[in-house]
Every structure is written in C-alpha cells, then in structure tokens.
Image (cartoon, rainbow, N blue to C red):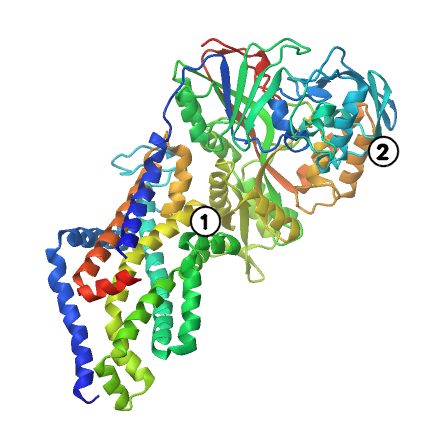
C-alpha cells in the first residue's frame, strides 16, 4: 500500500512536469561537419517506393519518370520527353547516361520491373494503366484502358519512383531503395531517421552536401527546438506562430510559401441538416475566414475561394464567386430552409439545428479552427459539437455511416493535375465521403481526362469548379502556407510549391 | 436493537471518528494536504462565479496574451482567459474524481461485502474476477476502454470506473473476513437478525474506515487518469475546459506561451499531491491494524 501511495505521488508530480518538460527535453550537441540534417513531421516507415516513395523522392534518393517544376507543372525527370501516340498510348524517352546507385544502367529494360510493380500496386489503382512495354532500349510505351490525359502527372508520384531491378526480390518486395537520385541510401532507423550520402555518379549536378540525414520528428515544438539547438539544419512545417520569433534570430532563416493545400469542411449530403444546400451555404456565410487567417494563421495563408489557390496554380477558375462573411445572409438561408429561431438555437419541426464537426489533431491548428467555427456557427443558431479523433477513425466512420461535417486538410494538387478533383467530387472515385453525385460534374471530369488540349481541359475543370461552388459538397475554408526554417548558413534553398522534392542537392551549407 | 453486542459494533465505529478529528490537525503533512484540498474546493465552487470571463467565449484579438492584471494567467490560443478555464476545469476535475471514486467505492464495497460474507464459490468467482482486473495496469485498460467507446468525458468516466473498483473489493473482503468472525457479529446472527441487517449494522461500519482512506488516495489517481486520457485526446472535447485537454492543446504553444501548459500542469500536480498527502495521513492516523490490513493487499 505504501508503494502504491508513493507511486501515485510521483505520478502526480509527473503530470506537472509534463507541462514543463519541453524546456529540458532537448540537450544540444551540434558542431557536426559535412552532415546536413533535415527534420520533418513524417517518419520513414518503409523502404518500398510504392508505400513511402514520396518521402524518398523528397530527399532525392529516388526519382520518378517525370518531375514537378517550381510552377507546379510536369517536367522532365528520368524521362526527358513524353508524348501521346494515340488516344490510349503514351511514349516516354528515357534519359541517357543514368545509372542506379548499384551501377545498373537505366534502360527501358531495367526500368520495367519497377514501373510495372508500381502501376500494379494498390496505391496507383486509380490510374487505368493496361500495359507497360519497351519500344526500344531508350523508349517505353504505356497503354491505358481509356484515354487518360493525367497520366504524365501520375508519373511524378512517389509510388512510381524507379528502383534498380536488383532491389526487387523474387517475391516482389523491395528491401532497399536503390534509386538514381543525387543522394544514395546508406542506412535508416525505421520510423525515425534515414542517412544518405552524395552520389558522385549522379546524372545531373552533384550535391554539395556530403551526408544527408533525414529525421522524422512528429512534434513541431521538438523540430523547432532542435533547429535552435543546431541539431537540425532545416526544420520543416513549423507552426505559423513561430515565424515572428524565428525571424528575430540572426542564425535562422524562415521561409514561408503558399502550397496547394486547403482546409475544408466536407458535408454529409445524405443526412440532415447538410443535405439541404441552403444550410451548407449558411455555414459558408457564417464562417469568417478572414478572421481565421488573420488571427489563427498569423496572416499566413489566405481565405479559400475554390479548391485551387490561384497564386500557386493556373488551374483555378478565375471568376469564382467567393462566399462572403455575412451572418445576416446565413440567418436568412437557415430560415428559408425551415430552421426557425428558438431560444439561442434553431429548430425545425421540433428538431434542434445541432451538428457535430469531426476533426483530427495531427495538423495542430484544426481543432482550434474547429472551435472558432463552432462559435461563429453558434452566432447564427447552429449548435455545434466538436469531436477530435484519429484521422483514420474519421475516414472509416464517415465512409461507412452518416456524419454531419468533417474538418479536413489535404493537398488539392499533390500530383500536378486538376484531375485531382475526381478524388474530391466524382461520384464513383471520390475518397472524400461527402456522397456528392452530380452527373454533369462526373461527365466533365471524364471528358477532361480524354483530351490533352489544355484549354479544353481548363474549360471543363472551370465548369466543375463553378458547379461545386454552387452545390457546396465541400466548403473551402483556407489555403495553406508552409513554414520552413533553416540555419542561416544554408543557402540556395528554394521551397517547392507542391513539396514533391526538397531539392537539397542544390543547397549549400556554410557552417 | 437489543443486546450488548450491537453496542460494541457502534462504539468501535465512533471511536474511530474521534481519532480522526483529534489527530489530523497535529500532522503537518496532513494539514498541508487538507489545506490544498480545501483551497481547491473553494476555488472550484466560488471561482467560476467570481470570474468576469466565460470559459468558452473567444476573443481572437487578444490571443496568447501573457499574464497581466486583466488576465492573471494570460489567455490561450483563442483569447480565452486561462484562469477562468482552470477554475471551471477544477470543478470538472473534482466532480469527475468524486463521481468516479464513488462508483468505484460503491461497486467495490458491494462486491467485497458479498464475497467476504457469502464465502464459498461466490467468493471464489468474484475474487478471480478481481484478480483479473488487478492484473491489468489500470490506466492501460482504461485507455483501451475509452478508445473503444470513443472520445468523450462520459466515456472516460466509465472507463476509469470500470477499472478501479477491484482494490476496494479486495480491501472490503479482507476486512469482512476478519470482522465476521468477531463475537458481536456471531451474536447478532444468533439473535436472528437478517443478513441485510447484520451487513448494514455491523459489517459496513467496521470496514468503512480503510475504504475512506483508499478513496481519498484514489481521488488523486482519478484526477490524474482523467487528465491523462484527456491529454491523449480521449476525454473532454473542445471547448470544454478540462485540465488534460488544456495541457494537450497548449503544448503546441510551449515556446510562445508557457502559461498555457504550466498553469494546468501545476494545477494537476498540486491537486494530486494534496489528495495523496491527505490520504496518506488518514491512513497513518487510523489504527495500525488497518494499516497492516491495507499493506497486505
């Protein structure tokens, strides 16, 4: 019994110390040579490109067939040129003079196993590739089941990163990321860090950094402290609030840049009250997005209009009508929809206007934003509950059952093609669980996949954006601004708009 | 109500009561514990009434303000007064702790009484159940239960109630086993009193003291458990001002706004500390035999 008591006392103290813990958690070491350490929230979980390729691509160990340039459009990668031969056939010319890290030369033949494996995998299931063949030593032919113009964009995805045929075991598994990038894999600790060294045989300009260490650090305060203690040379995705204090420091440079990512509300169109479009519109008029950006995002980011931020991509329809903050209009819309004021809230046929917003906290601002939305919706008569859950739990519950609204954040262009809209609103392929079904939207999205003409495609995607703006299956709230901080000696770092690669091979580090 | 035996039972109980009130003030640590608990109760009851702020009203223009005269403990990421939220949180934490501990106490005592008094296979079955529960680390089991039920304060209370009653059952059973062989119990039964009467009149008064001690010690644990589960996101949902939730959401602002984590952290620490000091000295104060009994557990 005495034992138990002591333990309880100790654990009591422990809880208090948890609060103070952050201050002492980190002890600086610093003073390393030729090693460039980057800290990011994502942990390396697999060496298989199909699973974790996007991470290996970001640190330039693996490279895909095509890359994404700083304008967020498709650019040459391991393939220097690509063309549509007929409606369902594409050709890719491979770069010459490229060798994998194990010395294997990159040819159509050595690329094939890795590429086939990628397009057969479940991560690429939405891409209708029928076959991949070699046309000659330097040319690949890809056939699709139907005309599919976003194919080049999908060839930039991390899952399609190429590994040497020797890296693929007989059972089809990949145990080592033997790629073609400017850095080659040395060692890793699953779930925490990767060490890579400069590849002197790189087909482009060699990296000036000799050793690259990637650390997956989920806690953003820890990343910041490690940067301040010289344990990191670059800390990625820091909280917006840190920018002001980081910029005051001489030894740290803060980069802020807009990315095509949005925070948005996904409404359940199959259940009351959001089945009614007027109620969804009322939400959009009730939420003051300017205030959220100004205060919660520290002015970093901007209120969203449609899915695409026009500063980052020219796929944004330019004449979308934004939903202005107008609580009066919101109240009118609710009254129109039959929700009459009753006390502090509203009721229709005796049912209260009460909704539950689900969100998750791995993006730390989401629960805070949810609370602001809760208050702002409260002002027009909604009664809002917030439930903070694991994102996977939300997905599962929202896909299999009814919900009200989910506050979510996702990239709207993580492969550089507006076909990404299909993931949001196409009635058959959408992964965003709103239950939205609109024949015109489906048809336009499918048509846009069939043509490679940019103007024709743009017209269709613009029409879809306009329909979405009216129908509001998803309420776009704010766009994203990333904060990346480096130590002051780090030069030539240029933030990539869709973060497909950190391009650390271009960075120099004056210790 | 006849016979000297019944009187013996009653007298024993009142003797203990006298002991409590006499000895506690003399014990320095107990005074500290009592003081903390008393201050906490006063704050929890009157604090929210006195505070000029509302715990949920946001003021985005004055977010993350450092402690000042208008906001003695600063404001949080949504401009809410931290002190006000702590006071409301104190109410919540104490309320939950009392509720959960009561459930544990009632369920545990009932099971212990039945097991101890009935004996035989009932005792055997109940005690194996208790063994099973005790074999699990309480907080881990609570984590699993709260995880399955989904995040909410009520579910956390349920989870903590389910896991915590076993030690009460053990304690009560062992007390009952020794008390039921005593002469006054035998006499009461020979006099033809019903089981219910014997239990209520003679058994419960004699096992209540150690149970109260255990409950006092337990309150600290429950507060810690609630805060812990809420910290992990299984408990109170925003904007409920719960200490653990406040700690978790303030963590993001550790460097900009230290008061967001330190204020609830220190509150949790002192509360648990206070209840544990109080419980400790209560146990020491009660007769050595009972201390010994509890140590056997």
- Left or right, residue A172 beside residue A508: right
Quarter of the picture holding the N terminus of chain A: bottom left
> Is residue A150 visible in the rendered structure shown here?
no
Query: Residue B178 falls in which quadrant of the image?
Result: bottom left
Report helix, strand or loop for mark 2.
loop
Query: In this view of the protein, which residue sits in the foreground, B145 or A166?
Result: A166
Q: Position of residue A117 (x, y in %)?
A: 75, 31
Up the image or down, A300 lies above or below B137; here it is above
Report helix, strand or loop for mark 1.
loop
| Residue at figure coordinates x 29%, y 44% from the top left | A13
Q: Position of residue A4 (x, y in %)?
A: 30, 54
In the rendered structure, the residue with mark 2 lies on which chain? A
Measure the C-alpha gap from mark 2 to mark 1: 48 Å
Q: Residues within 10 Å of mark 1 (few under 14, many from 20)?
A: many
- Left or right, residue A7 beside residue B251: left
Query: Residue A207 falls in which quadrant of the image?
Result: top right
In the picture of the structure, the residue carrying the numbered disc 2 is A146
In the picture of the structure, the residue carrying the numbered disc 1 is B237
Quarter of the picture holding the C terminus of chain A: top left
| Residue at figure coordinates x 36%, y 25% from the top left | A27
Up the image or down, A41 lies above or below B188; here it is above
Query: In this view of the protein, which residue sits in the foreground, A241 or A45?
Result: A45
| Residue at figure coordinates x 64%, y 28% from the top left | A54
> Is residue A287 visible in the rendered structure shown here?
yes
Q: Position of residue B276 (x, y in %)?
A: 25, 53
Q: Position of residue A12 (x, y in %)?
A: 30, 47
């Amino acid at each position: 019994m005495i034992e138990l008591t002591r333990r309880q006392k100790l654990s009591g103290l422990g809880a208090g110390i948890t609060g103070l813990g952050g201050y002492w958690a980190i002890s600086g070491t610093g003073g390393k040579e030729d090693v460039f350490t980057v800290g990011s929230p994502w942990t390396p979980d697999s060496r298989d490109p199909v699973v974790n390729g996007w991470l290996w691509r970001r640190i330039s160990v693996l490279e895909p067939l095509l890359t994404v340039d700083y304008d967020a459009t498709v650019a040459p990668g391991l393939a220097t040129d690509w063309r549509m031969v007929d409606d369902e056939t594409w050709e890719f010319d491979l770069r010459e003079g490229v060798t994998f890290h194990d010395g294997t030369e990159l040819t159509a033949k050595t690329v094939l196993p890795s590429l086939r494996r990628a397009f057969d995998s479940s991560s690429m299931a939405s891409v209708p590739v029928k076959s991949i063949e070699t046309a000659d030593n330097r040319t690949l032919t890809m056939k699709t089941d139907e005309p599919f113009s976003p194919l080049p964009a999908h060839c930039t995805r991390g899952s399609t990163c190429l590994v040497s045929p020797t890296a693929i075991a007989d059972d089809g598994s990949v145990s080592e990321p033997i790629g073609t990038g400017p850095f080659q894999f040395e060692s890793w600790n699953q779930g925490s860090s990767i060490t890579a060294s400069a590849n002197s045989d790189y087909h482009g300009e060699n990296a000036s950094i000799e050793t690259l260490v990637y650390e997956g650090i989920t806690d953003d305060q820890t990343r910041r402290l490690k940067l301040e203690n010289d344990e990191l040379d670059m800390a990625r995705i820091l909280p917006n609030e840190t920018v002001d204090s980081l910029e005051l420091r001489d030894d740290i440079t803060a980069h802020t840049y807009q990315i095509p990512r949005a925070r948005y509300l996904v409404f359940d169109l199959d259940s009351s009250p959001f089945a009614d479009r007027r109620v969804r519109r009322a939400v959009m008029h009730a939420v003051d997005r300017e205030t959220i950006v100004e205060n919660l995002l520290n002015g970093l980011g901007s209120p969203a209009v449609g899915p695409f931020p026009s500063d980052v991509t020219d796929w944004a329809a330019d004449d979308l009508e934004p939903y202005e903050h107008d609580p009066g209009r919101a109240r009118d819309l609710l009254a129109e929809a039959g929700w009459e004021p009753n006390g502090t809230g509203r009721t229709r046929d005796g049912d209260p206007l009460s909704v539950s917003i689900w969100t998750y906290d791995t993006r730390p601002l989401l629960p805070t934003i949810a609370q602001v939305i809760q208050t702002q919706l409260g002002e027009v008569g909604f009664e809002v509950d917030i439930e903070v859950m694991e994102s996977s739990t939300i997905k599962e519950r929202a896909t299999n059952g009814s919900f009200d609204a989910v506050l979510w954040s996702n990239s709207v262009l993580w492969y550089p093609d507006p076909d990404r809209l299909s993931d949001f609103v196409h009635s058959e392929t959408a992964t965003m669980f709103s239950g939205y079904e609109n024949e015109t939207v489906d048809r336009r999205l499918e048509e846009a996949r069939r043509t490679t003409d940019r103007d024709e495609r743009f017209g269709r995607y613009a029409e879809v954006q306009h329909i979405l703006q009216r129908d509001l299956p998803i309420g776009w709230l704010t766009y994203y601004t990333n904060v990346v901080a480096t130590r002051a000696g780090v030069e030539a770092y240029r933030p990539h708009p869709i973060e497909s690669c950190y391009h650390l091979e271009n960075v120099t580090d004056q210790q | 109500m006849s016979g000297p035996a019944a009187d013996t039972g009653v007298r024993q109980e009142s003797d203990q009561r006298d002991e409590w009130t006499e000895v506690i003030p003399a014990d320095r640590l107990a005074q500290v514990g009592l003081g903390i608990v008393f201050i906490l109760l006063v704050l929890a009851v009157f604090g929210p009434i006195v505070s000029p702020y509302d715990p949920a009203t946001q003021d985005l223009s004055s977010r993350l303000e450092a402690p000042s005269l208008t906001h003695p403990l600063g404001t949080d990421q949504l401009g809410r007064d931290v002190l006000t939220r702590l006071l409301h949180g104190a109410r919540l934490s104490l309320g939950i702790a009392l509720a959960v501990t009561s459930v544990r106490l009632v369920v545990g005592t009932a099971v212990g009484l039945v097991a101890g008094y009935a004996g035989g296979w009932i005792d055997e079955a109940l005690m194996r159940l208790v063994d099973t529960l005790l074999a699990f680390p309480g907080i881990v089991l609570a984590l699993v239960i709260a995880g399955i039920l989904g995040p909410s304060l009520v579910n956390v209370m349920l989870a903590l109630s389910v896991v915590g009653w076993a030690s009460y059952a053990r304690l009560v059973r062992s007390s009952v086993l020794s008390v039921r062989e005593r002469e006054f119990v035998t006499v009461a039964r020979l006099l033809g009193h019903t089981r219910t009467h014997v239990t209520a009149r003679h058994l419960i008064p004699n096992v209540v003291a150690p149970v109260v001690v255990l409950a006092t010690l337990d309150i600290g644990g429950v507060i810690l458990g609630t805060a812990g589960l809420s910290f992990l996101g299984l408990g109170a949902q925003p904007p409920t001002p719960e200490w653990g939730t406040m700690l978790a959401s303030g963590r993001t602002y550790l460097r900009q706004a230290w008061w967001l984590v330190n204020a609830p952290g220190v509150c949790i620490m002192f509360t648990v500390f206070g209840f544990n000091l109080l419980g400790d000295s209560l146990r020491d104060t009660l007769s050595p035999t009972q201390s010994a009994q509890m140590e056997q557990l």
